[in-house]
Amino acid sequence: MVKCIREIGCVPFLGKENIEIAGYWLRKVEQSLTQIPIPGNVQVSCVAQMLSNSARSWWAMVRER
């Protein structure tokens, strides 16, 4: 399913971008999720796989809380 998200133009998020770029990335991912039939309980896992570098580290800390 992550492959499908990437095929329609989503790129990994590194976490070093500014807030405007982060917002654009999030809107693109949300739009992509409406185009691909991914069950709600799988969406978070798919999007988490699009995180890289410091964004992935941040997500790991959030999940531990």
Image (spheres, rainbow, N blue to C red):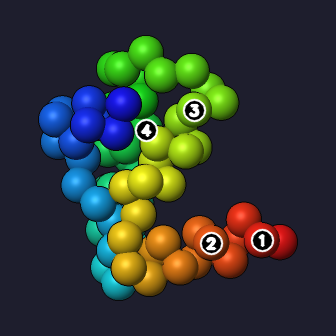
**Residue 53, image x, y percentages:** 38, 79
Q: Secondary structure at mark 2?
A: helix
Above or below residue 62? Residue 33 is: above
* Residue of label 1: 64
In three-dimensional space, the C-alpha distance between marks 2 and 1, rounded to whole angstroms, equals: 6 Å
In three-dimensional space, the C-alpha distance between marks 3 and 2, rounded to whole angstroms, equals: 17 Å
**Residue 14, image x, y percentages:** 33, 74
Q: Secondary structure at mark 1?
A: helix
Q: Secondary structure at mark 4?
A: helix
Q: Amino acid at mark 4?
A: Glu
**Contact flag, marks 2 and 1 (Cβ < 8 Å):** yes
What number is the disc on residue 42?
Answer: 3
Location of residue 44 (image quadrant): top right
Above or below residue 44? Residue 21 is: below
Q: Amino acid at mark 1?
A: Glu
Whichever of labels 3 and 1 marks the residue nearer the N terminus, that label is 3
In three-dimensional space, the C-alpha distance between marks 4 and 3, rounded to whole angstroms, equals: 13 Å
Whichever of labels 3 and 2 marks the residue nearer the N terminus, that label is 3
In three-dimensional space, the C-alpha distance between marks 4 and 2, rounded to whole angstroms, equals: 21 Å
Crowd class of label 1 (few under 14; some 14 to 19; many from 20; radius 10 Å): few
**Contact flag, marks 4 and 1 (Cβ < 8 Å):** no
Above or below residue 18? Residue 42 is: above
- For the C terminus, the image quarter is bottom right
Location of residue 20 (image quadrant): bottom left
In this picture, residue 31 sits left or right of residue 60: left
* Residue of label 2: 60
